[in-house]
Amino acid sequence: MSDFEAFALARAAGLYRSAWLLCGDHHAAEDLVQETLARAYSRWDRVSGADNPDAYVQTVLFRTFVTGRRRLSAGEVPIPEPPERAASAHDHDVRMTLLDALGDLPRADRAVLVMRYLLDLDVASVADRLGVSENAVRSRGSRALARVRERLGADFLSTTGDPR
Amino acid sequence: MNDMTDLLERASDDLLPDVPALVAGGIARGRTLRRRRRLGIAAGALSGVAAVGVGALLVPSYVGGPPSADEVPVTTQPAAPSAPGLPARLTLTLPAGVGPARVTLIRSWGSEAEGFRAAAWTVTPRGGAGAGRVEVLVERTSNPKAPKSCAEDPTPCSRRPDGSYVSGFTAAEPLSGGGDSDIVGAHTSLWTPDGLHVTATAYNALGEKDTRATRKDPVLDQAQLADVVRALAGR
């Protein structure tokens, strides 16, 4: 197994998770992950030599999503819908409502939420990876969080604090 | 951890993507990107858009929007003095088994000084139907991190006794506006231990894009392309 393959196998599930929250559906998420891995593969000498290869591929994924530059199924290798562990009816409702709420946000706001709250990155790291200012991250994060809270209501979010 | 974190995790923690398939798809697309970058570099040299040395030509550029992390310019090392010479002229000799066909040179570009030579031909089977394009790029690999063995190149690959190796794949070409085209490209590359890289691509059409397929399969298959790249590398 090559270094790249080992690297990609270890990261693909995590990248897919972020991609799924960003894109809201399986096919777009797998396209985004494949595009991210393709870019990493085509420049593996740089990625493997980077100080933090994980941050490097995350940056590629989020920037590709935000700028909408992925090739939209061009060359995508189709994969069947992924199996999911059985989810409760409540969890299913949570998922659908959350995806709807995220889908209403601008792409950059969605990216900020996923980076801040799923990846648990601080403001400075998000700003660095998206190539924007820290104030922009705070502003987008605050706005996005307010919108999601409004959409989801108290049943889902009761004590979520302001962006750290 | 706050409620938003909990919510995002609950919504996504039971997803079970097909990881091996994702990785395989990423590698296949990555190989296409890599090949296009190389051929794009060579085509740029032909057009004379930038009168710069080959080292600078190997630095990809990005126009429109912010730079992404995978497009950070890097400096490419010049070829080592002991790097192998390039063929004075690229010729396409059809391997046995292709059948009677006419080979027509479309164009050639590159030079010894630039570190690469490239050429494109149309291969027209007897009778005129089902013609396809074949492109070849021969370059010195000045990048010290270029793959040097099959172990570093996870697509189908075979090692030869002289230390060179050949790898290849076949994939549909994307439409420029998104979606799949009916054009299929077969790609085969050969790497030699002394730093020569030869890549050959055959299409089932007269071009890579903006045209329609003329046949079901590329005009040369991967095994035939392997013969082509070995001949061009003198192996």
Image (cartoon, coloured by chain):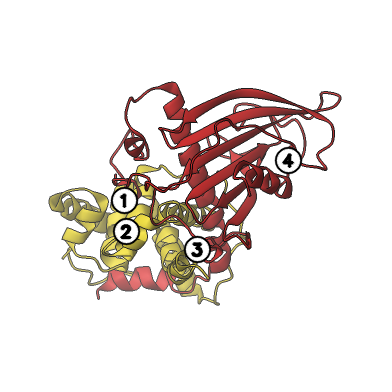
Q: Measure the C-alpha gap from mark 4 to mark 2.
A: 38 Å
Q: Are marks 4 and 1 on the same chain?
A: yes
Q: Residue B152 shows which numbered tag?
A: 3
Percent x, y of residue A12: 46, 66
Protein chain holding label 3: B
Q: Residues within 10 Å of mark 1 (few under 14, many from 20)?
A: many
For this view, does A161 lie left or right of residue B78? left
Q: Which chain is red?
A: B
Secondary structure category for the residue under label 1: helix
Colour assignment, chain A? yellow
Determine which residue is flagged by label 2.
Answer: A56
Protein chain holding label 2: A
Percent x, y of residue A20: 45, 60
Protein chain holding label 1: B
Q: Nearer the viewer, mark 3 or mark 1?
A: 3
Q: Measure the C-alpha gap from mark 4 to mark 3.
A: 26 Å
| Earlier sequence position, callout 3 versus callout 1 | 1
